[in-house]
Amino acid sequence: MDSYSLPPCCARNLQESPIQALSAAFSARTAECPGTAGFLQASSSFEVKDSTGKVCIIADLTVAFSVEYKSNGQKEFAHFFLPQNATVEPQSSCGEGNTSHPVLVLGFGAGHALSLNFSEYADKYQVGELVFHYNLSDATLFHNSTAGEVRRMSHKTIIQAYMGTKYRCINSKHVNMKNVNITFSNVTLEAYITNGTFSINKTECAEDMVSTTAVVPTTSKQTTSQVPTTSQVPTTTPTAAPTASPPNPAVGKYNVTGPNGTCVLAYMGLQLNITYLKKDDKLGLDLLNFIPHNTTSSGTCDNTSAFLNLTFEKTRVIFHFALNASTEKFFLRGVNVSTTLPSEAKVPKFEASNNSMSELRATVGNSYKCTAEENLQVTDKALVNVFDVQIQVFKIDGDKFGAVEECQLDENNMLIPIIVGAALAGLVLIVLIAYLIGRKRSHAGYQTI
């Protein structure tokens, strides 16, 4: 089995319904298909830069393909995933004004390519066209294929988001074309980037907006905001009653030691926010602050991934960090949460995970720092809130943080006093000029006797 084909134990006879089989493969559990659950959840991260090295497109996503083809006169189906070692092809571009638009071209295998062609209109950007080239002569995927040519399939407008926001879609989005079905999931995507990283604000896809619970914000401090979609899905589930927010958690100091010394160094306050269903079918809210001196830490790491495990009482949070070798940046790829809820909960044991994140990103050798509160969404029922965070992964010299890369929230907070100060300075200058002009005119009004 190659690195991106579907494991045999998850294969289906797809002559009847390829979409159903592909969906079944996505939902396969470890017990049914040992060793594949982690693979199915994995997403890949890609960036496009302009000639000056400035990032203009970032895409973290999982893509599954189902392709119909002929083999010895019979209809067959090939099923495979976009591999993590797919490459950003030279045809990728940031675009040039009105002459060309941004495009992300991902190449993989023996001549296969997936292209996302972006365009903008009004206050939105979109994937105006999705193009998939597949090579039927690739015997690894298309066994005994009758044809041997490269075929091209395209589809119009599958993704839309507001300018200055990242597009986020955890649930599956299916794209159906002739002989080809493509399924996107765990997608975080943004084009027309101006600050070199994902925007704080996000546009959520319609598939994710169908939710039975509402997450209650933990504090009145600045949090990641969400741009509303054009359509809203009503829900009859009651929301959790407002509760007083606890104080910000104390900052703990945690580290992980690997074969070559310290591989994770983290300072942060940690808070867990869980919405749950109570026995009376009302919603409850559990807010838990980790107390550093009662929190135990452990973890493992290698050259491309690192895990930080934090346990407080009956609650455990596992942070999974990964390395993007092409951009030489580390980032938070996943968070796993397990805890015991209050006795009023209908289901006392709670577990949640998200393995398609792209947060806390910084260059290897530098540290990521953010004074503002950041909300890491694990699921629609679970948030992990981090406060006063500073973290560095993989390359750490002398158990000390490297150069700091500030988060966008802190940069925005710094801009506010600068703008206010500049406005006040301008006002003082205007008053002074008006005063001097007034004095000059008053002196001109007197005559010498």
Image (cartoon, helix red, strand yellow):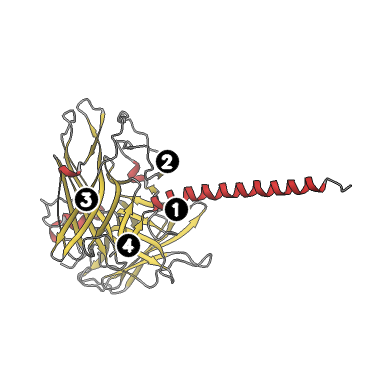
Query: Which residue is at the front of the view, 96 or 377?
Result: 377
Which tag, 3 or 1, sits closer to the chain's start? 1
Q: Quadrant of residue 9?
A: bottom left
Which tag, 3 or 4, sits closer to the chain's start? 3
- Which numbered tag is attached to residue 403? 4
Query: How crowded is the residue under tag 1: few (<14 C-alpha within 10 Å), some, or many (20+)?
Result: many
Q: Which residue is mark 1?
A: 164
Q: Which residue is mark 3?
A: 253
Q: Give the structural element (helix, strand or loop) at label 3.
A: strand
Q: Is residue 293 visible?
A: yes
Q: Give the structural element (helix, strand or loop) at label 2.
A: loop
Which tag, 2 or 3, sits closer to the chain's start? 2
Label pair 3/4, CB-CB below 8 angstroms? no
Query: How crowded is the residue under tag 3: few (<14 C-alpha within 10 Å), some, or many (20+)?
Result: some
Which tag, 1 or 4, sits closer to the chain's start? 1
Label pair 2/4, CB-CB below 8 angstroms? no
| Amino acid at dot 1 | Gly
Query: Which residue is at the front of the view, 378 or 302?
Result: 302
Q: Is residue 12 visible?
A: no
Q: Nearer the viewer, mark 2 or mark 3?
A: 3
Give the residue at x 21% y 41%: 290
| Amino acid at dot 4 | Ala
| Amino acid at dot 2 | Ser
Q: Position of residue 402 (x, y in %)?
A: 29, 62
Q: Give the structural element (helix, strand or loop) at label 4.
A: loop
- Which numbered tag is attached to residue 231? 2
| Amino acid at dot 3 | Lys
Cα separation between marks 2 and 3:
44 Å
Q: Looking at the image, which residue sits at the far front? A: 449
Label pair 2/3, CB-CB below 8 angstroms? no
Cα separation between marks 1 and 4:
27 Å
